[in-house]
Image (tube, rainbow, N blue to C red):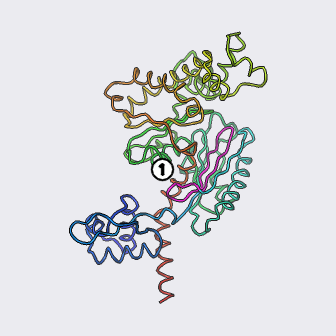
Amino acid sequence: MVFSLVDKRYLVFNLIRQEGPISRSAISRRLHLSSASTTVFVKDLLNAALVVESGQGISRGGRRPILLQFNDDCGYAMGFELDVTRIVGVLSNLGGKVLSMQGQPFNVNDGPASALTTIVAMSQKLLKEARVPNDKLLGAAIGMSGPVLYEEGIPLSPPIMPGWDGYPLRQQLQDALSMPVYLDNDANLGALGEYTYGEGRGIANLVYLKVNSGIGAGFILRGQLFRGAWGVAGEIGHVSIDEDGPPCSCGNNGCLEAMAGEPAIVARATQAVRAGHPTLLAERAAQHPLVIDDVVQCAQRGDETSRQVLALAGTQIGVALGDLVNLLNPRLLILGGEAILKAGVLITDALVKTLHRKALRAASRNLEIRYSRLAGQATPLGGVALVWENRRQAYVRDVLAEANSAKGEDG
């Protein structure tokens, strides 16, 4: 295969992005380029501010080599999480450094048009706060609860979002924001965010589990986000763990989401209060409808009923994850979502114990389990990563062309 100069520059850029800090001589060896060609290509990338010099490497007998690495600030993107009760947005550089963040309550029953208005207003606030150059803003991506037809950019019968099916959210936002926009499932973007910027960096096979109003999973397999044939992979919340269990929003009975999602946890706690169990929850329930924070806080104070409610949810999630580990054999399981991050070991002790009891030892013996460390921003940052993934090659080509044009004019 014969590569053009632009292609070769992109190959050099991509190697620096993936493996930097790296020296010019190492680039030459890895890409089978002459030293002269590497010098020219690197100079172009430096002039375009796509890469930067980052100190000196170890000498192998001569002068210490100058190292090169990707310039995180060569571009920016926005990522959003559209949850059932809240919308969160971030504007970040391409290295995952959040420059501005916005969040506000949202009722999914208000419909997609309301979400569209909210995201557009939030985008304007993010841009105003971060003050990034318009020509360096690559686009935006939204992660929403429920199945998404990724290529079409539309929700696909999301069980907990009535009225959203088939709404052209991506196209509407693209028109409103005048930039490329991508739409994906929130757990998918959570997995991509962790793989690119979080606990999963460098780990090619991982599962990201998100537990909040719904329960979803995102998969990175062989270093690629796996969506399935139509973008519906990862709907672990609709795996039935008890056919005689409560009805689920999807129409089945005993789905994991109906048994162990935030609303189910709160409903079980409320039922315990109504049944007259001795619990600290009773005082709170007399003041306001219970929420997940009440259950977690009472459990942290030693309330046995609250602890049992959370442990049961962990056990139920562990049942489903045991099967998932048998199917996919991931190296890493990352636990995220509001419910898990707030409750911590109150849920995850039972979850991990049950997972290992249900999964084959061969599948789970070397499995690492970690909490998300992205401060609730895994999905929005996954949106940033998705924009960069989709726009990278065209953006690098355009920036190089611009830099060459400017150099020609100066000359």
* Residue 81 falls inside the magenta stretch: yes
Q: Position of residue 167 (x, y in %)?
A: 66, 47
The span picked out in magenta is 78-98
Q: Position of residue 398 (x, y in %)?
A: 50, 72
The outermost residue toward the left is 61
User: At label 1, which amino acid type do we have?
Assistant: Tyr
For residue 368, above or below residue 95 = above
Q: In which quarter of the image is the N terminus?
A: bottom left
Residue at 73% x, 48% y is 113
Q: Nearer the viewer, residue 14 or 350?
A: 350
For residue 110, above or below residue 126 = above
Question: Which residue lies under the disc numbered 1?
Answer: 197
Q: Where is residue 255 in the image (x, y as percent from the top left)?
A: 56, 24
Q: Position of residue 268 (x, y in %)?
A: 64, 19
Q: Which of 183 and 40 is in front in this view?
A: 40
* Residue 333 appears left or right of 26: right
* Residue 145 appears left or right of 13: right
Q: In which quarter of the image is residue 83?
A: top right
* Residue 67 falls inside the magenta stretch: no
Q: Nearer the viewer, residue 140 or 302?
A: 302
